[in-house]
Amino acid sequence: MTPGGKRVVGVRDVATLAGVSRQTVSRVLNNNPDVAEATKARVVRAMEELGYRMNNAARALGTRRSRTLGILASDALLYGPSRSVAAIEASARVAGYWISAAFAQADDDTAVAAAIEHLVAQGVEGIVVVAPHEQTLRTIDALAAGVRVLTLHSAGHGAPWLSVDQAEGARLAVDALADAGHVRIAHLAGPASWLEAEARAAGFTAETQARGLDGVVLHLGDWTARSGYEAAAAVLESGATGVFTANDQMALGLIGGLHEAGVAVPDDISVVGFDDIPDAAYYWPQLTTVRQDFEELGRRAVEAFIAGPDAAAPAREPVAPVLIPRASVARPIADRLGP
């Protein structure tokens, strides 16, 4: 019975109204390709008319699949991890899957192991590791969890992975500054323990060298606006006229720190961010940045697990980032003033 006193609608009720067997209803629920389209449509109409709601636990008993994906995330309050978790959940829900999430500090091996064990105990069909750190991957490799593991944003490291092309994103940021005439460019990097920060810094170095630019990496950021604000003095000391920050929050803090020092963006120094958070279009100036397609990542992650345990590993073609030009990049002041 439901809280309102009504009897819960079951598979038998749907089968009776649709004029089919319970096995046929079960096949429709499990997307069996052998069900005729007309029969499937009749079953779906019956479910809608009766207000049938699928019982995931009961379904798991019949199919031996939990239709539940696990998510292991760290630093979930940051924009990238939180958007990744939301994108996976949305794609899973569309596909008729459930999500079970566990959160752990990346540098706490015991917490990571406990989170993995918690997810495995719930019978998840696989685990997506969001924004992994090198240490997290080492812990997971040592556990031999017994379920498939897929990592996001960790291209070239450990388990099968899906990622936005972080190095390509850094190249786009460098090119936006170089094409505006900047020759000495600084990169305000994220924390060294993050694989994404490592990939963006490597992409920055590769592109500045390829273009014969004077690039300098400042390892001062921790993803927060505060760290960007506090890096303003080091940026000025570097002599750079353009700065690529490893995320948009650090760009926001940097712009504030430069403003307090009497340095205007983009009149004196140009700034490019990374992520394209919703607020980026409302910074002053509006922030030129690199957009990551978290929705596509989530879709690909869910598709990889829906394919089943015997499917091949997901294709490792990274998702392409996109440069979003706005108002925080201008020609260097020396070029504008002339000789």
Image (cartoon, rainbow, N blue to C red):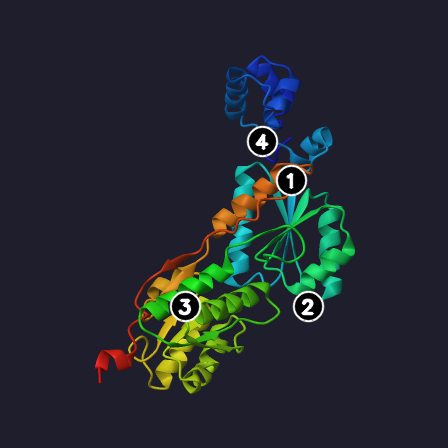
The mark closer to the camera, 1 or 4, is 1
Image height check: is 79 above or below 220?
above
Query: Disc 2 marks which amino acid?
Result: Asp
Residue located beneath label 4 in the image: 53
Secondary structure beneath dot 4 equals loop
Residue 327: x and y in percent read 30, 67
Secondary structure beneath dot 1 equals loop
The mark closer to the camera, 4 or 2, is 2
Q: CA distance from mark 2 to mark 1?
A: 31 Å
Secondary structure beneath dot 2 equals loop
Secondary structure beneath dot 3 equals helix
Tell me, yes or no, if residue 136 can be seen here: yes
Query: Disc 1 marks which amino acid?
Result: Ala
Disc 4 crowd, CA 10 A, few/some/many (<14, 14-19, 20+)? few
Q: CA distance from mark 4 to mark 2?
A: 41 Å
Q: CA distance from mark 3 to mark 1?
A: 36 Å
Which badge, 2 or 3, comes first in the chain's sequence? Answer: 2
Which residue occupies the foreground of this view, 163 or 339?
339
Q: Which mark is residue 312?
A: 1
